[in-house]
Image (cartoon, rainbow, N blue to C red):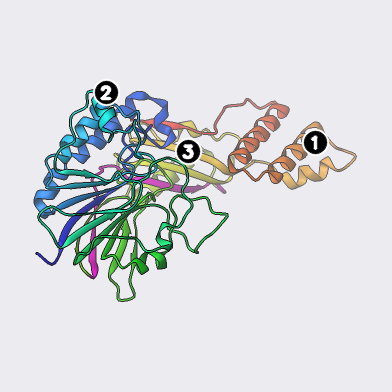
Amino acid sequence: MDNSLKFIQISDIHLGARVLPRCFSTTSELRLKREEEILSSLETLVDIFNDEEAEVLFVVGDLFDNDTVDSKIINRVFAIFSKLPYTIILPGNHDYISGACPYSQYERARRGLDDIPDNVYIFSGREYSSIYLPGRANVSITGRPFTGNSAVTEHRMAENIPRDPAEISILLHHGARTQFTFEEKMKVTAPFTASELLAQGFSYTALGHYHSFSTIESADGMIKAAYSGRPFACEFRARNGCLLIGEVTRNGVEQLIQYSIDKRKIFDLRIHCDNIEGNSSILMHAKDECERNGVLKDDIVRFSFTGTKKNDFKPELLIPSNELFVSVGDFSELHLGYDIDQMLKVADSKAATAESLFLKEMYTMICESDDIDEKAILSEALDYGIKALKGIKIIPNDTFVNED
C-alpha cells in the first residue's frame, strides 16, 4: 500500500562475539555450532521477506560485535542482505563507524572483502541524516550512527531531531530508554525517555541496544517505537528477543509480529532445595520444572538453586548431557547446610572453636561486600573452609555444565 510500509526489524545480533552464556566458553566446538546456527537462521530472512512481502529491513545497531569479525562472516551476512529488497543499517556502539569497522571502504579493501551490495544503505555521518526509501518518495528514514564505543550520556532526543519531510517518517535509534530525564548518575548509552521520543513526532522509531522486546505506545494505543531485542538465545538476562514484522502508516504501527528465528530458547529455572533429600529428588524436581515450563531438548537452561545445601549434594550429576543442549547451575543463593546463627553465638562465647571463628570472619566479609560475584566466591570459600575443618571431602561445585 502506498500509504503504509511493510518492514522487518532486527538488532543486536553481535556477529563475531564470543557466544554467550558463559557455559559456551567450555568448548570451541559448541561455540562454532552456535555461530553456524545464527548465520543459518539469518539466511531465512530471504524466505520471510518473500512470505511477508516486506519492503525493507532495519538493522538497528550491533550487527557486528567488534571490528575483528571474521571476513567469512562479514561476506556471508552481506550476501544475505543482497537477496533482500532493501536493507538500512544503523551502526551501534559495538559496530561503530571507524576506519577499521566492517563498513569502512578502506578496511574492506584492505581485507579483500566483497563490495557492499547496492541495496544496502549504512548511516555513516556524525550527525543526524535522512534518506528516502528508494521508490518511496513518501517514506524517509533518519538516523545517527555511533562513531565510538564510549558511553554517550547526552539525551539526543531532548532536542528536535532534523529530518526530511515525508508522509511516513521513521527514526532508527540505538540507545537506552530511561525512566526519568537527565539522570546524571545513570551511565547508559544514548539515553532517552518515552516522552522525549513521542515528542519527536516520528511515525515510528526502530530501537536497538536493549536485548529484550518492548514497545512504546501513544495515548491512542498506536505503537510508536519498539525494541526487537537480541534475536538469538545467547544470554540469561535477556528475554523474548526476536525479529519484528510490522506495517507503519503516518500514525504509527497497529500491531507488531514477534517472529522467532532461533530454534533454541533460554530458561532460568529456580529449584528450591529445602526439604529435598538427596540428588535423585533434586533431579526429579529439576526435570519437573523443565516439563512445567515447556523446556525442549534444543534449549539452554540455567538452574538457580535456593534454600539449604545438603552435604551430599552433587550438582554435577543432575541433568544427563543428552537431555538438554546446555544446562548450567547457579548455586550463589544456596545456604550452607548448618546453623550459621548458632555458630556465630559460639564464636562470641568462651567456647569458641576454629570453625566458629572462621565462619564469623568469613560471614562478616560476605555481609559487608556489595559485589554479587564477590559474595558468591566468599560463600563458596566459607563452605569449603568449614568442610575442611570438619574433615569432609571437598568437591568443587560452584558451577556445573552439561553439553550435548
Quarter of the image where one finds residue 351: top right
Which residue is situated farthest in the bottom direction here? 220
| Residue at the spot of label 2 | 110
Q: Where residue 357 is drawn, which disc sits there? A: 1
Give the CA distance from mark 2 to mark 3.
Answer: 44 Å
Q: Relative to the observer, which residue lies in front, 107 or 29?
A: 107
The residue segment tinted magenta is: 251-275
Asked whether residue 190 is drawn in magenta, I would say: no
Q: Relative to the observer, which residue lies in front, 373 or 167?
A: 167
Q: Where residue 76 is drawn, which disc sits there? A: none
Give the CA distance from mark 1 to mark 3.
Answer: 30 Å
Quarter of the image where one finds residue 74: top left
Q: Amino acid at mark 1?
A: Leu
- 377 lies above or below 334: above
Give x and y (percent) for residue 348.
Answer: 85, 43
Q: Amino acid at mark 3?
A: Gly
- Crowdedness near tag 1: few (<14), some (14–19) or many (≥20) residues, C-alpha within 10 Å: some
- Crowdedness near tag 3: few (<14), some (14–19) or many (≥20) residues, C-alpha within 10 Å: many
Give x and y (percent) for residue 10.
Answer: 27, 49
Q: Amino acid at mark 2?
A: Arg
Q: Nearer the viewer, mark 1 or mark 2?
A: 2
Q: Are marks 1 and 3 in contact (CB under 8 Å)?
A: no
Instruction: Tell me which label, 1 or 2, sits earlier in the chain.
Output: 2
Give x and y (percent) for residue 251.
Answer: 23, 70
**Residue that appears at 52% across and 44% down:** 305
Asked whether residue 269 is drawn in magenta, I would say: yes
Q: Where residue 329 is drawn, which disc sits there? A: 3
